[in-house]
């Protein structure tokens, strides 16, 4: 579950993840930023915005899923050979608490990196001042093309 | 798996679902519309927009999840007693094909409506001209508050 | 979602599924039988036995999963080229009602058959006399090796 | 994610989990043992047996799910008020490697313990001599009755 630079075979992965993320237009739309790119680990942050809400004013579960899924996909990508392309096969999300906070941070971590499939888990926390609450967890499968 | 008006106990469910949907600001942001509200069944349509994309220009899996999740939540709601509130407990999505098309339609259908928990499945199709392709399926649990 | 003999490329799939099922020793242990093998569809039946129970005397969710998973795997197999091997990548199960009944029938149906991955859904019913109740649903991913 | 005795309100939970586990007849059938009962954490061990196998001689994914699910249910139970009853609402399993080994250990850990619903994750390792490999991960929802 812990990876280091020795396990990456694509030395350009940091730059490539940044470029790919910059091409995800939905991240601009929702205001998400890529804040951590390490072997097997990605973090994406999303400040609260009122236009991302469900009926009670909290961030919609689908938007929380959006940042968690991209975090999982790029976490898988960091351990793939150069020239790979990654897509999500499936994911499962448990919503633990309403997505209520100033900022949301999705942190994905590779559990098993395989030749074709990579299994990843992500945790999403809501930050409000000093407070930090786990609001959602994801378990998913990413595929290398 | 098939419900009719006799199984609804909240005669105002159509109006209430419409009002609640109108309060989901994220639906305005992404351009989604509620197109069907029946006992145990909801449809939400989303026209393609370039600002909803992942790195290849297809609609991001999280946005497809956004419409599928709201469809599931409101499908569950249609069969709940008046005055209920619904939230997603968890969902699982399989992504079958890239979200490539002119319009996307998420159709959710209640599988089992319980006192506290409701289990729902949703299918998401991509429409392009006359063509219609299944691109994602969801299975999830909604909770009545 | 509907397949016919024209979509199978392995003309020996019925015999091969039967032989493979016969090699699953766990099916003998729990007393499960393969009762339907068609393109994209498999049924497995399990009569109730007191030694398959959880703490309340109902069949354990893991045993229900055992028949649903094998049904999904073989349903995927029916549409694969000859000489394929199939394994489960992941599955998700919602338990709708206690597994209470005389016989349990898991019916799996392929949703999308791909070159490497196949997505399958299964429903498990409990039969008691004339009564038939949906007790569990599965959504999963099978892989061709 | 870490719980201690101060968070348990049912002082008899260790004894109650043991008694309930002893009533799961399927655990006797497959030969599983309860090896750890702590606040929010359960471990169940399963020695390999040839009659638990799928077609290649490895332990069937449904049997791995059986021990992971019971581990999750009892982990949730340890943090519930006395007199509670627990049932699995749903779970999702990713199968990372074939279930090949001398012994299998499912370890479940509560992620969020709520009044009605508890979210749990489990890891299943295969042990062979000194070797220890992660073969499956579960994420699921348990309900208090």
Image: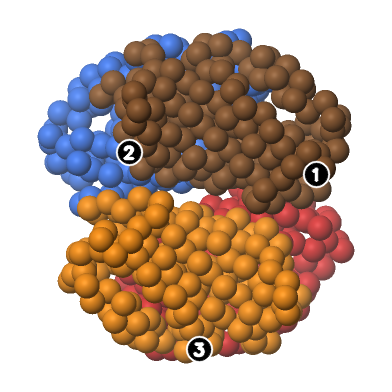
Chain colours: A brown, B blue, C red, D orange
x then y, percent, for residue D58: 71, 75
Res C4 visible: no
- Choose mark 1 or mark 2, whichever is in front: 1
Judge from the rendering whether residue A68 lies leftward or rightward of residue C14; answer left or right.
left
x then y, percent, for residue C141: 63, 52
Residues packed near mark 3 inside 10 Å, few (<14), some (14 to 19) or many (20 plus): some
Say which quadrant the C terminus of chain A sits in.
Answer: top right
Residue C64 vs B15, above or below: the answer is below
Judge from the rendering whether residue A87 lies leftward or rightward of residue D119; answer left or right.
right
Q: Nearer the viewer, residue B37 or A128?
A: A128
1 or 2: tag closer to the N-terminus: 1
The chain under label 1 reads: A
Circle number at residue D96: none
Asked if the residues shown at circle 1 and circle 2 are in contact, with their CB atoms under 8 angstroms apart, the answer is no
Residue located 73% across and 72% down the image: D131
Check disc 3 and report the residue beneath it: D29
- Choose mark 3 or mark 1, whichever is in front: 1
Check disc 2 and report the residue beneath it: A97
Residues packed near mark 1 inside 10 Å, few (<14), some (14 to 19) or many (20 plus): few
The chain under label 3 reads: D
Residue located 13% across and 36% down the image: B82
Residue at mark 3 to residue at mark 2: CA–CA distance = 39 Å
Disc 3, SS = helix
x then y, percent, for residue D140: 44, 55
Check disc 1 and report the residue beneath it: A7
Judge from the rendering whether residue A75 lies leftward or rightward of residue C107; answer left or right.
right
Q: Nearer the viewer, residue B120 or A68?
A: A68
Residue A91 vs B17, above or below: the answer is below
């Amino acid at each position: 579950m812990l990876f280091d630079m020795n396990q990456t075979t694509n030395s350009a992965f940091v730059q490539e993840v940044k470029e790919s993320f910059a091409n995800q237009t939905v991240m601009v739309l929702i205001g998400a930023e890529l804040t951590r790119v390490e072997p097997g680990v990605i973090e994406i942050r999303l400040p609260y915005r009122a236009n991302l809400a469900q009926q009670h004013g909290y961030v919609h579960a689908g938007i929380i899923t959006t940042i968690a899924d991209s975090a999982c996909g790029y976490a898988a990508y960091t351990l793939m050979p150069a020239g790979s392309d990654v897509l999500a096969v499936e994911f499962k999300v448990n919503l633990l608490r309403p997505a209520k906070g100033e900022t949301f941070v999705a942190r994905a971590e590779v559990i098993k990196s395989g030749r074709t499939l990579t299994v990843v888990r992500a945790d999403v926390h809501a930050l409000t001042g000093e407070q930090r609450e786990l609001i959602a967890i994801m378990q998913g499968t990413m595929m290398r093309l």
